[in-house]
Amino acid sequence: MRTVRITPNCAGCSYELRGLCGRVCSEYSLNMRVVSLLPSATELLIEVGGSDLLVGRSHACDLPRDLTHVPMLTRGNLCELDESLLAELAPDVILTQDLGLVDAKTVARVAASLRNPPRIVSLDPKSIFDVFDDLLRVGEAVGRAAEAERSMVTLRARYWSAIDFVNPFVPGPEVLFLEATDPVCVAGHWTPSLIEAAGARHSLNAAGAPSRRVDIEDILAAAPDRVVICPTGLDLARVREECSALERTRWWPLLPAVMDAKPRSIALIDGKHMFNRPGPRLVDAFEWLVAWINGLDELAPQGFPVEYR
């Protein structure tokens, strides 16, 4: 049986007796129902120990692997939401993003039409520090604030431990980070700042800016010493195909990373799960980045999904 609905944030709680408030809030957390329409939000929810709260997800929420029993609210169309199923699930909280799988206005409209309108937590990180903040936001929203705090401290510690291996006084290599290959798009949002923090340069896009399409002339002018091929939504098998297509273009052999033929200058990464999801594993991606740029293989997470050319 579900408990009475109250706002998890006590600032919005109407209970005058604090002891009663605390007891009900605890029960509320245990019985909360959460829908996630964003893969990274699902991973944040799992990170704060909220797997038992998840009652609905998007079709792209595929980690952890044991989510197959959780109903899917989207079916592959970027703007298609199963509104009747969402109403049936009656969530207390919906985790989403302004530019996520489902249009934010659609989510807000459907949520407002429900008998008990859920709280909408919309995430829009621009840096890894925003991701740490989002972890706390998700934890607070689902009544797992203490767990979120512990996880955030651990993730931040790993980030700063990796930073210790970067020499900020030595100019690093120029990196071309591809999030799409046809048309060619370079990484944005949190990725440029991660590249710079790892000791390299990313001249083709600024930290926090959206991913953007670039001209081949601009790529050649940047003269990248390293290349990361990490197309959004593609696993390693598909990334290999994208790399083969790039190798057949006229401009690819003109890149310093290709002409110099230094070992491991070109990295193929699973773009379905790494870098492109602003969740806890972004720290794994950063640790790999520091290891790759600085020649410190021992820092790379075991089993990181990368191949080198």
Image (cartoon, rainbow, N blue to C red):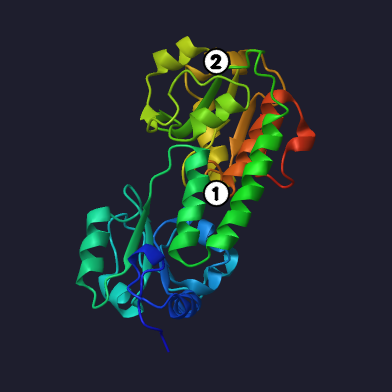
Q: Mark 1 = which residue?
A: 273
Q: Earlier in the sequence, mark 2 or mark 1?
A: 2
In the image, what residue type sits under mark 2? Leu
Indicate whether 97 appears above or below 71: above
Taking the spot 53% from the left edge, 37% from the top edge, the residue there is 230
32 displayed left or right of 236? left
Q: Is residue 4 depicted above or below 151 in this figure?
A: below
Kindly identify the amino acid type of the residue bearing the numbered disc 1. His
Q: Secondary structure at mark 1?
A: loop
Numbered mark located on residue 306 in the image: none
Q: Residues within 10 Å of mark 1 (few under 14, many from 20)?
A: many
Q: Quadrant of residue 255?
A: top right
Residue under the point 59% across and 39% down: 269
- In the rendered image, residue 127, in percent from the top left (x then y), is placed at 48, 37
Camera sees residue 34: yes
Q: Quadrant of residue 86?
A: bottom left
Q: Which residue is mark 2?
A: 255
Vertical order, 304 against 268 (above or below): below
